[in-house]
Each structure stands twice: as C-alpha cells, then as structure tokens.
Image (cartoon, rainbow, N blue to C red):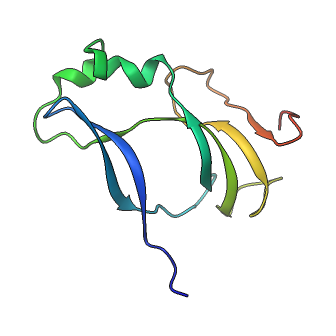
Amino acid sequence: MAQQKTMRAAQFHADTQSLRVNEIPIPTASGVDMLVKIVAASLCHSDLMPIEGNSPMTTLDANAKPVTIGHEGVGIIQAVGDKVKGFKPGDRVGFLATKNACSPPKPKTYRSSNKPK
C-alpha cells in the first residue's frame, strides 16, 4: 500500500476571512518534533480570535499562508525526530502544539496514563 502524502487540516485564510478544510502535505518529524496522527482536537480562544476579528492575523495581506487551527490534540505518534527522548511511534499522547502562544515556554506532553513527561 502506498504511503499517504497529504492530510486534511482546518485552516483560517486571512485573505478571505474564511475557515476551510484543505489537503496539505504531511510534515516530517526531525529534531525535537513528533508527527502525531490526530484522533481528536479542540479549539481554544486563540483559534477563534482570528475568526472573530480579535487577532493580528485578521490584518494579514492576501499573500499570507493559511493558519492551521485546533492545536490542542490527542493522538498516536507516527514518527519522532532524532532528538526526541522517551517517546516512540505507537505511543498515545495529548499535547498543546504551539510555540510562544497560550502556553508556558516549556510545554508538557501527556501519555495516555496522564503522567506529565
């Protein structure tokens, strides 16, 4: 069976102020990154801010790239970067996938047992 090369992602388009589900390339895991197949994701206030017009993203020009929303997720690790320690493909995790947004600088990843790692 051929390996899947794209995935669906809910994305906000600043140029049209619209939210659409797009087919995008599946990223690769490198360094400290983990590739997680999402089982469920939720929206927090920072996901809704551009849709409601309460974010600097709403002033982006027409050339701005779409922004994927739903950064609070749970899923199954598919691949890990070479600097990842303590996680492996097949592990079930919950996470906050964001940098310098609504979380402390050192995010936590939770295994299905709910123990912080």
The percent coordinates of residue 10 (x first, y second) are 38, 43
Specify the quadrant that holds the N terminus.
bottom right
Residue 34 in view: no
Q: Position of residue 5 (x, y in %)?
A: 43, 72
**Residue at far bottom of view:** 1
Choose top left, top right, bottom left or bottom right for residue 113.
top right
Residue at the image point whose x is 42% and y is 25% from the top: 47
* Camera-side residue of 58 and 74: 74
| Label tally | 0
User: Would residue 16 be seen by someone viewing this image from the given angle?
Assistant: yes
Q: Quadrant of the C terminus?
A: top right
Residue drawn at 86 percent across, 34 percent down: 114
| Pick the front one: 32 or 47 | 47
Residue 100 vertical placement versus 38 (above, below): above
Q: Residue at x 57, y 61 (%)?
A: 29
| x and y percentages locating residue 105 in the rendered image | 61, 25
Question: Would you say 72 lies left or right of 14 here?
Answer: right
Quadrant position of residue 12: top left
